Amino acid sequence: MNAMLESPLTVLIVEDEQAIRRFVRAALEGEGYRVCEADSLRRGLLEAGTRKPDLIILDLGLPDGDGVAFIRDLRAWSSAPVLVLSARVEEYDKVEALDAGADDYLIKPFGIAELLARVRAVCRRYAREPGGSGIIAFGEVCMDLERRQVTRVGLPVHITPIEFRLLATLVTKPGKVLTHHQLLREVWGPAYVERSHYLRIYMGHLRRKLEADPARPRHFLTETGVGYRFCPS
Amino acid sequence: MNELSRSHDPIREKFQNWADTSSLSRGYAVALLVSLSAALLLPPLLSYLDHANIVTLFLLAVVGVAARYGRGPAVLAAVLNVLSFNFAFVPPHFAFSFETLQSILTFGVMLSVGLIVGQLTARFRYQAQVACAREERANNLYAMSRELSGALAVEEVVEISERCVEASFRAKARLLLPDDHDRLQPPAAGPGKPTVDVAIAQWCFDCSAPAGFGAESGFAAAPLLYLPLRAPLHTRGVIVVEPEQPSSLLAPEQRQLLDTFAMLIAIALERVHFARVARDMLVRMEAERERHSLLAGLSHDLRTPMTALIGLTETLALELPAELQSCQESLIAIREQAVRMGLLVDNLLDMAKLQAIGGVRLRKDWQSLEELVGSAVRMLEQPLREHPLRLTLDPELPLVDCDPVLIERVLVNLLQNAAKYTPPGAAIGVTADVQTDGLFVEVWDEGPGLPDGHEQDLFEKFTRGHTEWAVPGVGLGLAICRAIVEAHGGHIRAENRVAGGAGFIFSLPLATPPPLEIDDEPDPHPI
């Protein structure tokens, strides 16, 4: 798809393992992305500064430093999306990375299909024009952000103010993992970032109101131990 | 130690006794000598001195003897002086006469002065002796506490305590210490050590009360004294004392001193104990930290090549022409093997993590079971594809305080097993039920069920239901489930269901979640 674009998107891979860089590059180039590589965090920052990539794929387990510090540093001057690669032992590093401003994560080992799906989702989200009509539709649900109305199968659904804030926060960042901290801060305020039971309860409400099968949600997905992700399709 | 050894040198003590007796007899001799010389030397002075002055000289001699030698010699001096005064100065000269009132008065005054001064001297001397003894006790205590404060090992404390008690009380002493189950260890018999009755010592330790010789709390007839070593937090042991002269321990000061010794020893033992605990804790924390960083490193090092293997295989499959079918099939097989190896590594690392010394660190938080089941089911979309799924979870289920990643792992492992060991088409389900002792979650299936009588063996490491099963796996999944559930304070069991099929039930303790403190518009149509 991207091969057909006028100017292909540039992806920077920051990963110390040559074999992984090799297959990630092959997969991305096959999809028409332009790829550049860095084998350390230091080089990664340098490349990010000079090449101005549209997406950065970052291994959290690099030997020369802390990936989370890299993201904080990067976020000071760039809003390029970051896709984090993590081994499972570092599962809480990855929450930290997301809180620091990473957009999504992939757990090693991952396959090419998974990688490309994530890359596409992240790029699509950034390519989308901000603003828009203010009307968002997913599944059987239609939501009007300006008039604060939600309908399901054409029938109005009663949504409380907090539920609406939570819903709006999620649906305006489709496909992105929002951590517990980010959601609690956004919806309830900074004083509530430790009260994750609020989220559980309100997510339960939303699912019951908007999902066909609340026990097997299709739109409001749980990223266990990390946060939630809104999936429009 | 100098003070102790000096004060309890037996030769010195004998010398002391001898010195006391000899000083008394010398006092009598001096009294005799003084009276005689007064009687002999004073009469020539009669021409210069008045009778009254002569009497004062006699009186002076009595006072002198009383002050120097105490009551006995003073009385003797008074009597002798009265006699010699009477003999030499009271007419008729050189004969005794007690008829005159004067001579009786002189006699009375001299005797009373001698008695009073002697009495005072004796009292002062006694008090000086008491002060000496007190000082000696303080020195002994000080010497022992100074030595104990430098002791770093239990053996040192034992050695110092036994030596000091033996030196200070002229007794044999023995320290008995408990093992990890609070049983006192019988001492090795040695020369110069008391023969200990371990039963009495154990009683003394258990009740934390003195026992044996002279003790009011128990076994008063026993020949040895057993004192508990009571420290602020715990009784640390028992000290057994066998005095050379049993009566010496009956003196209240001696018992008090011994009690103080026991307390000092107990505190020293407690200090050494906690020093060891702190040291062990440091070592354990260090080992745990190393283990964690080793696991993290291992996990990263194993996953990285696995990622490369899977990714490169897939790349190769994409690059190879689709017509090379056998090559494509091989690549798919390689990929599958790599994925399996990845799962195996996950399991082994998880098991290692869960068996960490001191238990796994749980990252607990209030979780909704429905959510955890939902995400577990989503992770297993592929394997569960061929099975009808029945999730019967009450929307009103309470939140559970648990580690979400680990409990999700339990659900994934159980659902994965159900998918693996039941034929396609067999239903799989999850139910949950609040009971008085927790939340009970059951993952059930309509498969062939479990081998009878071996349901609980499945939770052992590397155990599988039927070894001949062609399904790949090593049998760590359920062991991991058990480790996780038990770390949460719950239980897990397996059973064959009455309706057929297997059921795996685990429980999680329930608590009251914190309240919601936020104002939100009430829902007009609660669901």
Image: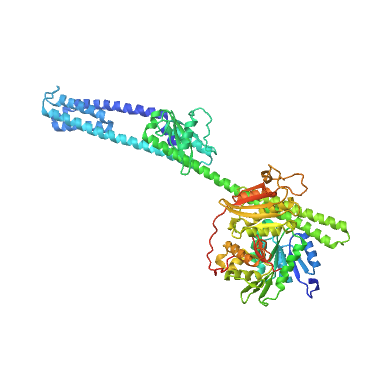
Please determine whether, in this image, residue B361 is positioned above or below residue B222: below
In x, y percent, where is residue B428? Answer: 70, 54
In x, y percent, where is residue B21? Answer: 32, 26
- What colouring method underlies this structural image? rainbow
Which image quadrant for residue A184? bottom right
From this viewpoint, is residue B432 visible? yes
In x, y percent, where is residue B268? Answer: 48, 41
Please determine whether, in this image, residue B87 is positioned above or below residue B133: above
Residue B24 is left or right of residue A2, and the answer is left
Name the residue rendered at 78%, 57% in the picture: B310
Which image quadrant for residue B299? bottom right
Name the residue rendered at 64%, 61% in the picture: A226
From this viewpoint, is residue A102 visible? no
Q: Residue furthest front?
A: B499
Which image quadrant for residue B250? top left
In x, y percent, where is residue B372? Answer: 65, 58
Q: Residue furthest right?
A: B323
